[in-house]
Image: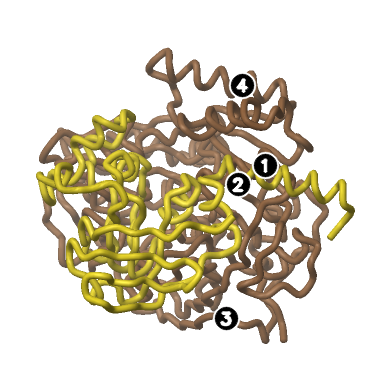
């Protein structure tokens, strides 16, 4: 199973390094659980019209060390509810990265991405080619490869699917003998 | 070419000698540690059973659970969560420790910080077991993997080595050293790496000071921190170790992603200003800022040397009327020792509000601030809303500076109270 390329517009560019994703829904809302409620609150401090502008498949772009601080899950629950398909950033904070990969939410490390996009450009993340295409500007930039485990987790849609896949692999190994 | 301590530990845990940074392997955690928290343990217990049909964990002696958040419970739902944890532990013959203190500290007291061991938790502050030469990773929801599978998939991390040199000035504590490291390396300086600490400053630093520093590794971007075992930590760790593992250390010719030497001999007390743990500043620049709340505690700093420093500042003095000083020792073992030494008596006499160990002050479940209030804190974090209203503020300082601020009702230099 190969990862499908992501293709969508840049719905927003977070230019602040060490960005604390909790700001997306506002710290006072961080304990909410309902995706629709969270989605309605998302981005109010950045672009109140965000929810009406975003389309399924759109992407977010971030700066260095995206997700720094003490990231919680609700901000990206809100983003996925709005149709956001993934995040491309200069680099990521490990805790945030692990948390979202476990949710099956694609994250792409791409040094140089901030200078490569404008808001609403159409991007394509070409996993196999380890590159990102900017279809609006007709440009290409290299992105970092995923680790084997991260790729498998995204392919399986998150940690639960990934562990089921490991179960299937283990069964095959037992049946076929060690490989 | 030699290996880092991290590469050695993962080589053993994976059964693949000679691992290098970047290798991807399946490794068997020696210990799987968690505290109960909604969305983590309750979900893991449910998914184990519902998704994977697993009623009981394999090798229950590898697992340990703590009840340290929401202690004491204030709603029936919280107590339900705890009861579910107790029931799960009993059914799985997995120990559940409650009311003994903050799990990351109690884990060390109970010997889970076995030198050379590989430990996983969902919470990144477990990094503090690195004090004892234990590789301890906080993996968030990936922790499910360790409950369902014997081995977890891991990419061997690269290591940044930081050697700290020089003796600390009076009034400068381990917290100042850590936040100075963040100032020098930046909040992403060790991203996805292990922060390995050494040098003469570390060699002469107490276990408690090392725990404060390794606890906070995540704010350098590191996935954990580690110190090679030495004569300071080995007697403590060996006496309590739960596994007969041979301690390992980095080889002299180990490969590091980067090496830094940081001279801390002239370091002055610092303050980490809101709203980010990246904002280390000289304390001197913020003297006089009015504060209404002080929190001395957390998995980073609520240990004996913190309590002693605060008591030294407060002995014979009084907390300013109206100022709320919360003192929360990190564990019962620490609290008992502080009581025996008379440290708690000094703090109580000065007007401190002393509570039993709990995580709850640190993450804003109790003792919360309203809009416009400010705290000085030895908690782990100063992001908006961490200790109450999103419009309150947290200034992170060392324990002595919390005590000094409690006297004056404003950010103050503790050193003038520590003389004589």
Tell me which chain appears brown: B
Q: Which percent across, then down, holds residue A171?
A: 80, 44
Classed neighbour count for the residue bearing mark 3: other residues with Cα under 10 Å, few (<14), some (14–19), many (≥20) = some
Tell me which chain appears yellow: A
Q: Earlier in the sequence, mark 3 or mark 4?
A: 4
Secondary structure found at label 4: helix
Q: Which percent across, then down, holds residue B195?
A: 51, 69
Residue B166 in view, yes or no: yes
Which numbered dot is residue B256? 3
Q: Chain of mark 4?
A: B
Classed neighbour count for the residue bearing mark 2: other residues with Cα under 10 Å, few (<14), some (14–19), many (≥20) = many
Q: Earlier in the sequence, mark 4 or mark 1?
A: 4
- Which residue corresponds to mark 1? B110
Asked if badges 2 and 1 are on one and the same chain, I answer no
Tell me the distance, in whole angstroms, between the alpha carbons under discs 3 and 4.
43 Å
Q: Chain of mark 2?
A: A
């Amino acid at each position: 199973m190969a990862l499908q390329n992501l293709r969508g517009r840049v719905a927003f560019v977070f230019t602040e390094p060490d960005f604390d994703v909790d700001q997306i829904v506002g710290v006072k809302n961080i304990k909410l659980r309902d995706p629709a409620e969270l989605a309605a609150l998302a981005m109010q401090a950045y672009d109140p019209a965000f929810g009406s502008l975003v389309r399924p498949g759109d992407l977010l772009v971030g700066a260095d060390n995206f997700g720094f601080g003490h990231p919680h899950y609700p901000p990206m629950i809100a983003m996925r509810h709005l149709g956001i398909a993934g995040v491309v950033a200069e680099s990521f904070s490990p805790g945030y990265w692990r948390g979202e990969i476990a949710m099956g939410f694609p994250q792409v490390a791409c040094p140089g991405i901030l200078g490569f996009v404008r808001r609403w450009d159409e991007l394509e993340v070409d996993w196999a080619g380890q590159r990102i295409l900017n279809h609006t500007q007709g440009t290409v930039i290299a992105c970092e490869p995923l680790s084997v485990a991260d790729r498998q987790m995204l392919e399986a849609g998150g940690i639960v699917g990934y562990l089921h896949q490991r179960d299937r692999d283990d069964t095959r190994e037992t049946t076929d003998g060690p490989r | 070419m030699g290996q880092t301590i991290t590469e050695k530990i993962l080589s053993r845990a994976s059964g693949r000698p000679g691992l290098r940074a970047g290798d991807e392997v399946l490794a068997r955690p020696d210990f799987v540690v968690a505290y109960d928290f909604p969305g983590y343990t309750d979900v893991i217990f449910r998914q184990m059973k519902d998704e994977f049909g697993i009623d009981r964990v394999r090798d229950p002696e590898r697992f340990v659970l703590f009840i340290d958040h929401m202690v004491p419970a204030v709603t029936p739902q919280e107590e339900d969560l705890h009861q579910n944890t107790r029931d799960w532990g009993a059914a799985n013959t997995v120990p559940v420790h409650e009311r003994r203190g903050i799990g990351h500290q109690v884990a060390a007291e109970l010997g889970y910080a076995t030198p050379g061991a590989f430990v996983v938790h969902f919470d990144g502050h477990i990094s503090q077991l690195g004090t004892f030469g234990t590789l301890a990773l906080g993996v968030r929801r990936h922790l499910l993997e360790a409950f369902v599978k014997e081995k977890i998939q891991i990419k061997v991390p690269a290591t940044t080595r930081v050697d700290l040199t020089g003796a600390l000035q009076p009034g400068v504590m381990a917290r100042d050293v850590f936040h100075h490291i963040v100032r020098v390396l930046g909040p992403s300086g060790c991203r996805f790496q292990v922060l390995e600490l050494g040098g003469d400053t570390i060699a002469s630093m107490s276990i408690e000071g090392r725990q404060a520093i390794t606890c906070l590794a995540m704010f350098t971007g590191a996935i954990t921190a580690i110190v090679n075992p030495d004569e300071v930590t080995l007697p403590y760790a060996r006496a309590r170790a739960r596994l007969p593992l041979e301690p390992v250390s980095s080889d002299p010719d180990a490969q590091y992603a980067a090496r830094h030497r940081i001279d801390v001999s002239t370091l002055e007390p610092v303050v980490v200003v809101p709203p980010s743990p990246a904002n280390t500043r000289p304390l001197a620049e913020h003297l006089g800022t009015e504060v209404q709340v002080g929190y001395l505690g957390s998995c980073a700093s609520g240990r004996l040397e913190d309590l002693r420093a605060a008591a030294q500042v407060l002995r014979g003095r009084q907390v300013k009327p109206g100022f709320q000083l919360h003192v929360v020792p990190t564990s019962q073992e620490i609290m008992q020792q502080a009581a025996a030494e008379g440290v708690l008596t000094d703090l109580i006499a000065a007007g401190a509000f002393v509570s039993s160990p709990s995580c709850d002050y640190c993450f804003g479940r109790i003792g919360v601030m309203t809009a416009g209030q400010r705290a000085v804190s030895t908690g782990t974090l100063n992001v908006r809303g961490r200790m109450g209203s999103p419009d309150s503020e947290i200034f992170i300082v060392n324990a002595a500076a919390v005590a000094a601020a409690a006297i004056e009702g404003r950010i103050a230099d503790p050193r003038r109270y520590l003389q004589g």
